Image (cartoon, coloured by chain):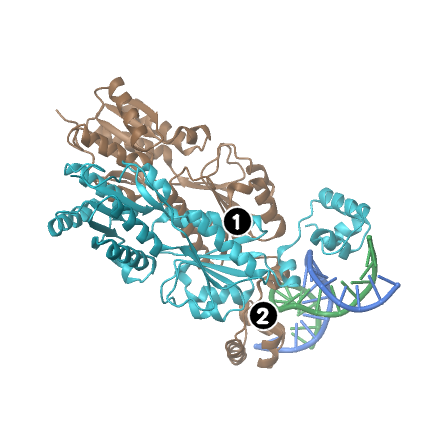
Chain colours: A cyan, B brown, C green, D blue
Amino acid sequence: MVTLAEVAKHAGVSASTVSYVLSGKRSISTGTRERVERSIQELGYHPNAGARALASSKSNVIALMMPLRTDMYVPVMMEIALAVTTTARAYGYDVLLLTGEEGPAAVRRVTGSGLADAMIVMDVELDDERLPLLRASERPAVLIGLPADTTGLTCVDLDFAATGALCAEHLGGLGHRDIAVIGEAPAVYERHTGFAERTLDGLRGAARELGLRLLHRPSEGGYGAMAATLARIFDERPGTTGFVVQNEAAVEPLLALLRQQGRAVPEDVSVMAICPDQLALSASVRLTSVSIPAHEMGRQAVEHTVAKLAARGTDGVELIAPELTVRASTGPVPG
Amino acid sequence: MVTLAEVAKHAGVSASTVSYVLSGKRSISTGTRERVERSIQELGYHPNAGARALASSKSNVIALMMPLRTDMYVPVMMEIALAVTTTARAYGYDVLLLTGEEGPAAVRRVTGSGLADAMIVMDVELDDERLPLLRASERPAVLIGLPADTTGLTCVDLDFAATGALCAEHLGGLGHRDIAVIGEAPAVYERHTGFAERTLDGLRGAARELGLRLLHRPSEGGYGAMAATLARIFDERPGTTGFVVQNEAAVEPLLALLRQQGRAVPEDVSVMAICPDQLALSASVRLTSVSIPAHEMGRQAVEHTVAKLAARGTDGVELIAPELTVRASTGPVPG
DNA sequence: GTGAAAGCGCTAACAT
DNA sequence: ATGTTAGCGCTTTCAC
């Protein structure tokens, strides 16, 4: 293993000079710099991460805590994770992957050991048991998602309330008056993950203003569950002409069932989804949707993290404005 | 920040004693151990990861290199990653997440810096440019997937050849003679990712033995592409009664199209898939399938890694035997 | 612009 | 069963 000292000897300079060439923290004459850089190349030197962390009290690692649960839409999680990783690399950070499994203990372990300089936490619950630790920790933390009490925390999320409102306005504007909302699985609501409720609030607020009737049904997703849910919806509100789906696993079953019942989309009923663009595009009908900006969420989370590490951090909530893309699944109310 | 020295003083012992209490590398009298453990609790001590790594030349971190590409089935990648992470934790390791983006440079960076003790690489291509570095590195590496030349490497993968054979045998046993294989996107084949070809080899070998006719068509997945592909298949081989699908994005479109054409599954045509159980269960027809054992692959990769780190490592290829589950989508050939 | 040297917190011989 | 001590490889004052 090549050490900094060996590079120094090879280049005929002192260890500190090599260190400063690497860090750029003081000016180096061009000649010296070139000699050192050549030595680094020739010897194949790589700075030792442990020694660096020890001497500088910085690991250049950001911990990312992922949900272990797989009841959320997995591709979104994955896209966030990849966005976090690539963005972090762009800022010189590596990413340590943690699962929610360990719970608060993981927070303690990582912040206590200096394994990571900061932490990004996904899938935050409204009253998450990790929050007290994160607030108390001197290491920066950024949440993806919104807990009930955000004081002393930095949070990044899609503005789900605005998302809900946007959906209601779109369908209302097309003349729909009876709207069904197919929500996440009941377990998601029970877990109080926040985003589902916020979406509903947004929908309800806008519906009230516009005089729309809203029927909300959580759904497990899948064909069987969706068939039962759909039957009950049309039973209760036969005049339903608009659907808002916030459950990736319910999208295709819903479309298939409507087709099967002879209800054409968008001629007879309009369907819109809150989902990643990719899903909206690959569904059997190209879906009008509000996209879940997974990449953007990951990127912003890292940028807030880096800012806080540079001590120009700003606590607060950063809500990403929803964007609606009209595609082939919504149209004016029939008749 | 609490240090080991502070714990030692607080407990009235030497630093090394505290270290040995922590590592268990030498016997400690019960009294001493208890005093040290109490001090650790009271002071809230956490060993510093950097100092540990420096002194022991071990980071207790395993790097996991994920594909950046998102053209593979994402939930499988995610499940592998989670399995790797939880299994690694069970062995006392943390996981550093790398994307393929950096390519071979990431291998150099991580192995060179001692950031990680070992490396697990996913989505290996047949002639992957990272292989020379992994072979040369003194740090253990385990691949998930099978390159063309596996000498000097440890690999874990599903036995895709046996998987292909199993599919052919299942359909052949039900009397099907004309079988269509819906494969991955052309890009996957062009990238020479190995598993697709191996599946095909297995299918072809068994088909030859059993006297089956095989028609292989790569597919982008999605409704549009699948419609075109299916039309060509029935055009070319009108007598096709069996389908093997190795492309998650093609499963539901295929089922929908068959339904739409009035071909009942499994009465008129049988469909089987090579996919995770979850997808097989949530499809519109419960699919007979060979499952992709994502969790098992992640777990075994870690266990091989840990074994190699303990110097009881064994190079070689570990193929996981395929398991077929018969569900509602395959049946005897009609007539 | 460069060097010397004192740690950073821990591990692992080497003692006893 | 426990203590002493010499590093591990790097960063960063302090000195010139």
Residue at 16 percent of width and 31 percent of height:
B264
Q: Name the disc covering residue A197, or none.
A: none
* Position in image of residue A192 (x %, y %): 31, 62
The amino acid at mark 1 is Thr
* Position in image of residue A115 (x %, y %): 55, 61
- SS class, disc 1: helix
Graded by Cα atoms within 10 Å as few (under 14), some (14 to 19) or many (20 or more), the crowding at tag 2 reads some
- SS class, disc 2: helix
* Front position in the image: A270 or B148: A270
Tag 1 subunit: A
Is residue B270 visible in the rendered image? The answer is yes
- Give the left or right position of residue B145, taking residue A185 as reference: right
The amino acid at mark 2 is Ser
- Give the left or right position of residue B261, taking residue B70 as reference: left
- For the residues marked 1 and 2, what is the alpha-carbon distance in whole angstroms? 37 Å
In the picture shown, does residue B195 fall above or below B207?
below
In the picture shown, does residue D15 fall above or below A95?
below
Say which residue label 1 marks.
A87
* Front position in the image: B92 or A123: A123
* Position in image of residue B132 (x %, y %): 58, 37
Please tell me if label 1 and label 2 are on a single chain: no
Tag 2 subunit: B
Graded by Cα atoms within 10 Å as few (under 14), some (14 to 19) or many (20 or more), the crowding at tag 1 reads many
Residue at 27 percent of width and 34 percent of height:
B253
In the picture shown, does residue A252 fall above or below B164?
below
Residue that sits furthest to the top in the current view: B236
- Give the left or right position of residue B33, taking residue C7 as reference: left
* Front position in the image: A6 or A69: A69
Q: Name the disc covering residue B19, or none.
A: 2
Quarter of the image with the C terminus of chain A in it: top left
Query: In this rendering, which labeled residue sits more in front, label 1 or label 2?
Result: 1
